[in-house]
């Protein structure tokens, strides 16, 4: 009888092309029987979804508690804000009752959870429309921004990371490392207006990075947003700078990770074996190291979606994108707490879902995870 | 070399060549794609930021600039600026700059006939005025507009301005449905007042008096459908995102003036001031309806390329440090005077943004007010010796620990607070600063029980009259427990008496009386330390002409024309 591990190792010897098998062999995990695997995945998915639900409840509870704590400490009154400066105290009380903000905060929270369970995010005090009517279109804008930025940062990171790993300590590696360090140090609230000024505004004045273009060029808009259905080209043009503004910092972090990971793998036995069998560096990366780095990147990506939503707030503000960050900020300024909590809930839902999706994807890519 | 080997190597070469060709094809395709996008990008101009046609203009405002689109509720300066384009009040001002722009002229109605010792105003609604649905605008419509304004369901801020109309309070209290002091017959609207008010005509110019169709909902209508009496109507409104105004087909230019020269006004909501400034200079935006950043403005003012496109104007507003008369030691007039001597107004103006952003003042009324004359009551650079002497004379114990509240969501306020904090240290005051967005800060300081010792705020007139400063801000009889605008809780019987005397005055005697009260109040009681009168900078694109800065509402959207 041949042990799974031995069997898989032998398969490597037989066929070095099978990268997935090589990865499994490296991890010491063989393919299990289909029936067990389905059970594992079901258990894992259930566990993960329950955890996601609990996370969501905690986040909304904390958001609610904080909002009311701050309002209590500062004396801010949403009803007074809605009533306007000319309203009498009696009118403010009346509006507070209509809005339901005269009840204890925990009672309001229970009401909120009850509504949330039925898919109702509430009603905006300031805009006088259902929160979902505001949050969903905004979420579309933020998704355009975050997903696009993630694609940009992955492409940059993989390219820069691999170049650095393939030519370690070379001139190009050193230049890229300096670029990476600089990008990590550059905050998004500085990068965004600089990109807008240098690459969108200056060309309209006939300059690019201080060099004369000879004529005015309107190639990228300074701000604003166009929906992808209205005009896919304008949608992309309006988002190019926001994507890069949001992606630069992440790209640098990911590039550093990819470079370190790939370099580490180059010294592993299975890579040496593949090299000995005549596989090119590119093939080793594509077929052997790639399947190993993918789960790690997917995990990072899942975690970073939440972080990117925070960064998106600045980018949306600078480029005038009507996304979740913009909506959330404006709702806080207007003490519109159904909208604030609705935005936080939705953003939390996205972050939690992204985490869960990343975990599930990782489980698909990495059998050790689903085995618990 | 065997034949097999040759065949094998030959096949390998073919495979390599094929791979090379397909790689080359891929690279060429990618380059073509990139070139197409770049060329397309360079040729096409973005739809959101482009001047769509010769008769379309494109403006922007920051997030939260539009408080309401119901003409009974709006109160923000930015929405009143839009009112010039979207509605016509009962009375109005000419669309011109300078003092001529402060003269009241007919709006929906001609100037009224005043009888009964200033207690009865008879307005003639102009003939031939219609709403877009073809229904006439007559006296009954205007009366219904006032009945709606006072209704409990609307909770309009207008109530405090118009409660001098007989029977208005009963409607506001819910004991009557119609204002008994307003009668309508054909095109004649008669308004009876409980007592004469010299500024009543000016009060009738505020955009709350814009007529709304009979049968309009009693509660708030925020989709802009009630803005139907100006040269433009709201054709699309996405809250906090965009507003599109198109020509009002029923607008009677013969009666109401040839106003509005673009077919469409597009207004983007939520545009950052710094980005807006770049977009205007790049020709992607025609103007910004809010404050532009001070640092950029200072540069732009000296840019020869922007000559004729950048305008610096005085505003009818005052930024002031108020001191709460309910709270020690500011319940002592000598302490308040000492603070006025201690602050260096020039230094505070520098942190506010410099000379392009305002001019220093030690008076309550702004220089734009009729009859204003500049009286130097307190030294511009401060006088610490005099301040210390007054503190000594006040008998208070030093050091004093106190708190100053201001807003954090508008540039300049926190910086002014820090300058005041540093200057008051010299007279033994340890000031701690608390800042919060206006939505929070405003609620705290307008609640009298909060007993906030000091704060920095700004007040902009609703109409050009002294009573719009003294009544809401410094009349002790108008202090309310909540929603109080008299943050200083200043209640001086002699000042209240003088306010009540001034209210009935008319013409230049009235203007002089307010200016005298301003000077005497600041000299003797110093409820505030007025700091500066902010200026306003407008930057417009090279696509538009006809810029007019009206002294009441600022940039006039109805005078702009395509170039």
Image: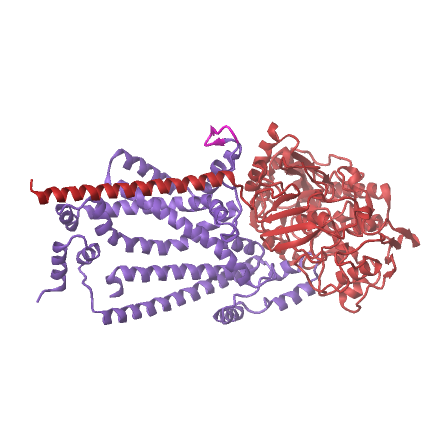
Chain colours: A purple, B red
- Front in this rendered view, residue A19 or B99: A19
**Chain part drawn in magenta:** A207-215
- Front in this rendered view, residue B100 or B282: B282
User: In this rendering, would A170 be left or right of B38?
Assistant: left
Give the answer, above or below, for where A79 lies relative to B376: below
x, y percentage for residue B77? Answer: 68, 48
Corner quadrant of residue B295: top right
User: In this rendering, would A210 be left or right of B458?
Assistant: left
Q: How many marks?
A: 0
User: In this rendering, would B408 be left or right of A174?
Assistant: right
| Residue under the point 76% across and 37% down | B98
Give the answer, above or below, for where B83 lies relative to B145: above
- Front in this rendered view, residue B421 or A106: A106
Q: Quadrant of the N terminus of chain A?
A: bottom left
User: In this rendering, would A320 be left or right of B139?
Assistant: left
Residue lying furthest right: B116
Give the answer, above or below, for where A371 lies relative to B188: below
Q: Quadrant of the C terminus of chain A?
A: bottom left
């Amino acid at each position: 009888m041949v042990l799974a591990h031995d069997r898989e190792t032998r398969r490597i010897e037989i066929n070095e092309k099978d990268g997935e098998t090589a990865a499994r062999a490296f991890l010491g995990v063989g393919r299990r029987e289909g029936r067990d695997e389905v059970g594992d995945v079901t258990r894992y998915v259930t566990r993960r979804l329950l955890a996601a639900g609990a996370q969501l409840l905690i986040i909304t509870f904390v958001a609610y508690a904080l909002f009311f704590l701050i309002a209590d400490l500062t004396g801010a009154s949403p009803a007074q804000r809605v009533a306007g400066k000319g309203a009498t105290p009696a009118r403010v009380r009346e509006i507070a009752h209509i809005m339901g903000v005269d009840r204890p905060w925990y009672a309001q929270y229970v009401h909120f959870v009850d509504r949330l369970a039925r898919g109702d995010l509430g009603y905006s005090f300031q805009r006088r429309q259902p929160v979902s009517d505001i949050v969903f279109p905004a979420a579309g804008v933020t998704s355009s921004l975050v997903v696009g930025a993630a694609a940009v940062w992955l492409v940059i990171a993989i390219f820069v990371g691999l170049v650095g790993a393939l030519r370690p300590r070379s001139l190009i590696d050193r230049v890229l490392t300096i670029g990476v360090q600089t990008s990590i140090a550059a905050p998004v609230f500085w990068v965004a207006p600089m990109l807008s000024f240098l690459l969108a505004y200056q060309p309209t004045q006939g300059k690019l990075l201080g060099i004369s273009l000879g004529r005015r060029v309107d190639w990228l808009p300074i701000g604003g947003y166009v929906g992808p259905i209205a005009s896919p080209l304008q949608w992309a043009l309006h988002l190019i700078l926001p994507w890069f503004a949001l992606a630069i910092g992440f790209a640098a972090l990911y590039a550093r990770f990819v470079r370190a990971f790939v370099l580490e793998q180059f010294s592993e036995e299975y890579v040496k074996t593949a090299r000995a069998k005549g596989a090119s560096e590119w093939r080793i990366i594509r077929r052997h190291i790639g399947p190993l780095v993918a789960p790690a990147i997917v995990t990072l990506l899942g975690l970073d979606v939440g972080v990117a939503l925070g960064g998106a707030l600045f980018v949306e503000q600078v480029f005038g994108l009507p996304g979740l960050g913009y909506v959330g900020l404006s709702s806080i300024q207007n003490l519109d707490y159904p909208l604030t909590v609705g935005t936080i809930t939705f953003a939390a839902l996205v972050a939690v879902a992204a985490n869960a999706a990343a975990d599930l994807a990782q489980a698909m890519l990495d059998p050790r995870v689903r085995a618990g | 070399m065997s034949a097999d080997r040759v065949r094998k190597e030959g096949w390998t070469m073919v495979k390599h060549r094929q791979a090379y060709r397909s790689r080359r094809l891929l690279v060429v395709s990618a380059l073509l794609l990139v070139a197409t996008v770049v060329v397309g990008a360079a040729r096409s101009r973005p739809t959101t930021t482009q001047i769509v046609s010769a008769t379309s203009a494109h403006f922007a405002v920051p997030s939260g600039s539009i408080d309401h689109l119901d003409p009974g509720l709006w109160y923000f300066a930015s929405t009143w600026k839009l009112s010039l384009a979207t509605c016509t009040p009962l009375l109005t001002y000419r669309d011109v700059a300078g003092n001529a722009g402060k003269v009241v002229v007919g709006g929906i109605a001609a100037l009224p006939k005043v009888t009964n010792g200033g207690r009865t105003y008879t307005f003639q609604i102009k003939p031939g005025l219609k709403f877009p649905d073809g229904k006439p605008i007559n006296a009954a419509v205007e009366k219904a507009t006032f009945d709606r304004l006072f209704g409990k369901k609307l909770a309009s801020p207008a109530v405090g301005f118009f409660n001098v109309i007989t029977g208005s309070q009963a409607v506001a209290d819910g004991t009557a449905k119609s204002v008994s002091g307003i009668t309508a017959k054909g095109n004649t609207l008669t308004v009876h007042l409980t007592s004469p008010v010299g500024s009543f005509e000016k009060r009738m110019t505020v955009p709350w008096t814009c007529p709304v169709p009979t049968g309009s909902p009693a509660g708030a209508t925020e989709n802009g459908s009630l803005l139907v009496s100006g040269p433009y109507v709201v054709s699309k409104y996405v809250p906090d995102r965009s507003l599109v105004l198109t020509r009002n087909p029923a607008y009677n230019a013969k009666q109401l003036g040839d106003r509005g020269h673009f077919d469409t006004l597009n207004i983007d909501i939520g545009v950052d001031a710094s980005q807006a400034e770049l977009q205007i200079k790049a020709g992607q935006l025609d103007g910004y309806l809010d404050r532009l950043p001070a640092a950029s403005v200072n540069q732009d003012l000296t840019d020869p390329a922007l000559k004729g496109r950048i305008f610096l104007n005085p505003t009818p507003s005052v930024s002031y440090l108020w001191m709460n008369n309910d709270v020690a030691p500011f319940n002592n007039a000598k302490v308040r005077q000492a603070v006025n001597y201690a602050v260096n107004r020039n230094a505070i103006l520098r942190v506010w943004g410099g000379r392009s952003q305002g001019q220093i003042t030690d008076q309550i009324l702004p220089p734009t007010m009729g009859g204003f004359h500049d009286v130097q009551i307190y030294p511009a650079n401060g006088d610490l010796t005099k301040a210390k002497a007054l503190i000594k004379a006040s008998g208070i114990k030093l050091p004093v620990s106190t708190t100053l509240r201001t807003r954090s969501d508008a540039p300049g306020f926190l910086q002014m607070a820090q300058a005041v904090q540093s200057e008051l240290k010299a007279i033994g005051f340890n000031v701690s600063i608390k800042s919060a967005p206006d939505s929070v800060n405003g609620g705290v300081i307008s609640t009298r029980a909060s007993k906030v010792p000091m704060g920095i705020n700004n007040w902009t007139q609703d109409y050009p009259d002294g009573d719009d400063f003294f009544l809401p801000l410094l009349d002790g009889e108008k202090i309310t427990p909540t929603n109080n605008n008299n943050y200083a809780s200043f209640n001086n019987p002699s000042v209240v008496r003088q306010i009540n005397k001034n209210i009935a005055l008319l013409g230049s005697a009235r203007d002089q009386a307010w200016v005298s009260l301003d000077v005497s109040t600041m000299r003797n009681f110093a409820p505030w330390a007025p700091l500066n009168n902010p200026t306003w900078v407008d930057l417009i694109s090279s696509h538009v002409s006809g810029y007019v800065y009206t002294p009441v509402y600022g940039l006039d959207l109805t005078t702009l024309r395509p170039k």
